[in-house]
């Protein structure tokens, strides 16, 4: 039941983080305005891009701890964590100094503001640098906890800190100072508490044997995987964040704020995506290390089908009922009119991206970092011209369309390159049965929901959403029942993750 507990904890973490984020955004808009919220969106994008400096080390510590099954290998993993402690804090200092130094240039020559003066923007960006520096080492300790399969502890800490971050920011804006500078000062304070807390938790779980020192030997032993992960991180984050970086330059700060609102809403899909990946990747790694190929294939196929059966209907709800959701969320008809089309398009692209986490986890479990690197490099080549062209002609809507087009390309390119080397006989089954069938079911029911519910004038907005949820549940049920693999699963949904422990049951399910 450890897997089940971790998965539930991860889901609880994602759900709570999203709910509290969605709840406070209307308050941020009320006290700060769309342009200042655009700065928060720019901060989110900047923070994501600076993860490039991670060099794949958080994934490395995750993988090494997950694979440490003997006292000797566990000490090596602890030694690596101790060494990376120094590396991460050094990078954090470098990040803070660099962002503060370039903040005047960004304020004057990059962001386009009509209401905020350059000095306010510059001060806000300086504070962003401090916040990012305070939070930077968190990824290392999260990787250690996830690799130790202590996702429940990691999730608990994150829930507390996200709550403190957002509710504290609301209190600051209401009772102390409704300014963007006050918002970022509070975020820096919470970031410092967060990193100290999770560092203590990580070392208490991993254990700190006596005699640990800074050692380049451990880094050298894992350098190939780390370098590969670093290249993947750089190219992957560029692919994921280039649209936002390009839009921040080509459209107004207010329009960019609307685009980021749509992005935040669609990120609700990652309530499901992130915790599932955090469970699947260590499981795949353990099965690869144990050379249990049959169990790996079964978990890969049935896991994807179950995941897609949940993810695609949820994305369909966002796409079809986007106006109702945004209007209820913000209470602003004008914002809902501008943001809803972006949500619809981004939701479909993000759902396609979500199912690709399974091939990605498979690639990393085998240590085949060259595969995602090739994929990301190819997609980056396409991202800039497609995003720039569509944004210049269609504005924010063009950026959303570029996101969708690029992730459709990702689906077909990624599947081809993955199964050319790994689980070679499963590529066609994966894309047609595991992904294609849930997608078709969701599209057909989505068309029905759009024409007979969302566009109907006979239903109140809350009734529309209620009926939309019913359509989602029907889509999930049909997708599961149409899969022979899922119909044969035990009633306990977490048994799927433990399938490698019962080879006899696995063989029977495949027949």
Image: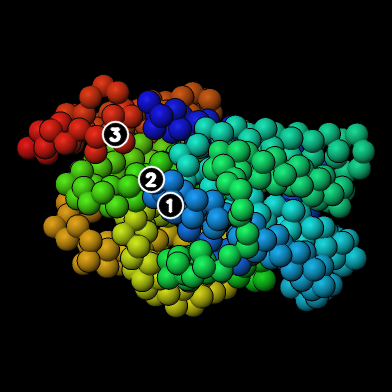
Can you identify the residue that label 2 sits on? 69
Q: Is residue 209 found left or right of 425 in the rendered image?
A: right
Cα separation between marks 1 and 2: 7 Å
Q: Is residue 462 found left or right of 70 in the rendered image?
A: right
Q: Which mark is residue 498?
A: 3
Q: Is residue 271 above or below residue 234?
A: above
Please provide percent x and percent y for residue 179.
87, 48
Quadrant, the C terminus: top left
Q: Is residue 247 found left or right of 296 in the rendered image?
A: right
Query: Which of the pair 386/16 is nearer the observer?
Result: 16
Element under disc 1: helix
As drawn, which residue projects farthest toward the right?
A: 176
Query: Which of the pair 375/331 is nearer the observer?
Result: 375
Q: Residue at x 90, y 65 (%)?
A: 119
Element under disc 2: loop
Q: Is residue 226 found left or right of 200 in the rendered image?
A: left
Which dot, 2 or 3, sits closer to the camera?
A: 2
Confirm whether residue 310 shows in the render. yes
Can you identify the residue that label 1 sits on? 73
């Amino acid at each position: 039941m450890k897997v089940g507990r971790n998965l539930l904890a991860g889901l609880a973490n994602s759900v709570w983080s999203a709910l509290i984020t969605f709840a406070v955004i209307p308050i941020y808009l009320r006290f700060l305005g769309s342009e200042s919220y655009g700065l928060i969106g720019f901060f989110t994008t900047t923070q994501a891009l600076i993860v490039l400096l991670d060099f794949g080390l958080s994934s490395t510590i995750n993988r090494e701890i997950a694979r440490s099954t003997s006292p000797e290998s566990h000490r090596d993993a602890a030694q690596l964590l101790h060494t990376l402690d120094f590396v991460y804090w050094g990078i954090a200092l470098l990040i803070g100094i660099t962002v503060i130094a370039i903040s005047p240039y960004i304020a004057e020559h990059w962001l386009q503001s009509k209401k905020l003066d350059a000095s306010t923007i510059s001060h806000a960006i300086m504070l962003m640098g401090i916040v990012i520096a305070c939070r930077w080492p968190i990824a290392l300790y999260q990787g250690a906890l996830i690799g130790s399969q202590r996702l429940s502890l990691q999730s608990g800490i994150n829930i507390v800190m996200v709550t403190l971050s957002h509710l504290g920011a609301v209190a600051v804006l209401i009772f102390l100072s409704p300014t963007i500078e006050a918002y970022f000062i509070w975020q820096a304070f919470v970031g410092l508490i967060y990193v100290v807390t999770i560092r203590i938790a990580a070392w208490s779980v991993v254990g700190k044997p006596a005699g640990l020192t800074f050692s380049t030997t451990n880094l050298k032993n894992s350098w190939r995987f780390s370098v590969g992960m670093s290249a993947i991180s750089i190219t992957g984050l560029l692919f994921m964040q280039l649209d936002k970086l390009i839009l921040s330059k080509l459209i107004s700060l207010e329009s960019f704020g609307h685009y980021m609102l749509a992005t935040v809403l669609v990120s609700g899909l990652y309530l499901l995506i992130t915790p599932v990946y955090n469970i699947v990747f260590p499981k795949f790694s353990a099965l690869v290390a144990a050379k249990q190929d049959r169990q790996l294939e079964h978990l890969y196929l049935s896991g994807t089908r179950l995941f897609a059966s949940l993810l695609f209907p949820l994305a369909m709800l966002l796409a079809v009922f986007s106006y109702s959701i945004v209007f209820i969320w913000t209470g602003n008809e004008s914002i809902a009119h501008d943001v809803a089309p972006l949500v619809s398009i981004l939701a479909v692209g993000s759902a396609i991206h979500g199912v690709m986490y399974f091939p990605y986890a498979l690639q990393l479990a085998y240590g085949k970092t060259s595969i995602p690197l090739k994929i990301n490099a190819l997609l980056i080549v396409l991202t800039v011209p497609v995003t720039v062209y569509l944004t210049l002609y269609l504005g924010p809507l063009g950026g959303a369309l570029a996101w969708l087009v690029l992730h459709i390309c990702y689906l077909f390119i990624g599947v081809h390159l993955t199964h050319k080397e790994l689980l070679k006989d499963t590529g066609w089954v994966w894309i047609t049965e595991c992904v294609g069938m849930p997608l078709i079911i969701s599209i057909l029911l989505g068309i029905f929901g759009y024409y007979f519910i969302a566009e109907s004038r006979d239903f109140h907005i809350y009734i529309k959403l209620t009926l939309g949820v019913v359509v989602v549940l029907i889509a999930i049920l049909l997708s599961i029942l149409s899969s022979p693999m899922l119909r044969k699963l035990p009633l306990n949904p977490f048994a799927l993750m433990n399938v490698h422990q019962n080879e006899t049951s696995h063989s029977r399910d495949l027949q």
